[in-house]
Image: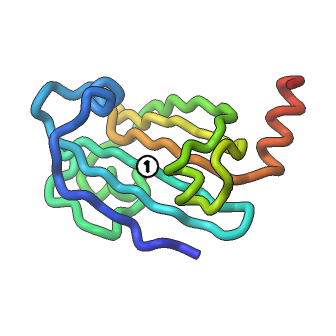
Amino acid sequence: MFTKPMLVPESAASDEERARLALFPGEMVYRLDRIRGQGEQLVLENIRLPAALFPTLRSPVPRISELADTYGHQLGEVIETVCGVAASGDIAKALGVAEGTLLLMLDRVVHLHDGRPAEWRITYRLDRKTLAMLIARLGI
C-alpha cells in the first residue's frame, strides 16, 4: 500500500520548521505527508523542505538524494535520532492503530555539503520487531 503523497505548495515555515531547517521568518517550506507500507510495516512520514533550495517542486517528490541531484546540490551530514513514542490521536488514526500504541520515531535532518539543512523528516513506524530490538538493547 502506498498512499498518494500530499505535497502542500509553498507556505510560510512554522516556528519549529524554521528552527529545524535554519530558516528566517517569512521563508517558505514544502510539506509532504504520506503513508507507505502495509500491515505491521506501516510508515507515516512528515517531510519538510526549504522552498528556496527546491524551487518549482512538484509531486511526486523523489528521495532527497535524487532531489539534491536534480537541483545541483551535494548532500553532507545527516543527524538522526530514534526513540519510542506513544501514538497521538492523529498519528494513530493515520496508521490505523489505537491511540497510545508504541511506535518507533525517527527524526532526521539532512544537510547539504555546505551545512545548510535540506530536509527535515519525522518518520513514525509501526514496526514491532525493530521496536522490540530497541527496547531490548536499551534494557527497558
Residue, x 59% and y 29% (percent of image)?
Answer: 81
Q: Is residue 8 left or right of residue 97?
A: left
Residue that badge 1 annotates: 46
Give the residue type that dot 1 points to: Asn
Q: Quadrant of residue 59?
A: bottom left
Q: In this picture, is 128 found above or below 25?
A: below
Q: In this picture, is 47 found above or below 41?
A: above
Residue, x 34% and y 69% (percent of image)?
Answer: 60
Percent x, y for residue 26?
10, 32
Can residue 9 be seen here?
yes
Can you name the residue that lies furthest to the bottom here?
A: 1
The C terminus appears in which quarter of the rendering? top right
The N terminus appears in which quarter of the rendering? bottom right
Percent x, y for residue 62?
39, 62
Find numbered disc 1 in the image and state the secondary structure of the residue it sits on. strand
Percent x, y for residue 130?
78, 46
Packing grade of label 1 (10 A; few <14, some 14-19, many >=20) is some
* Visual colour scheme: rainbow
Residue, x 26% and y 27% (percent of image)?
Answer: 15
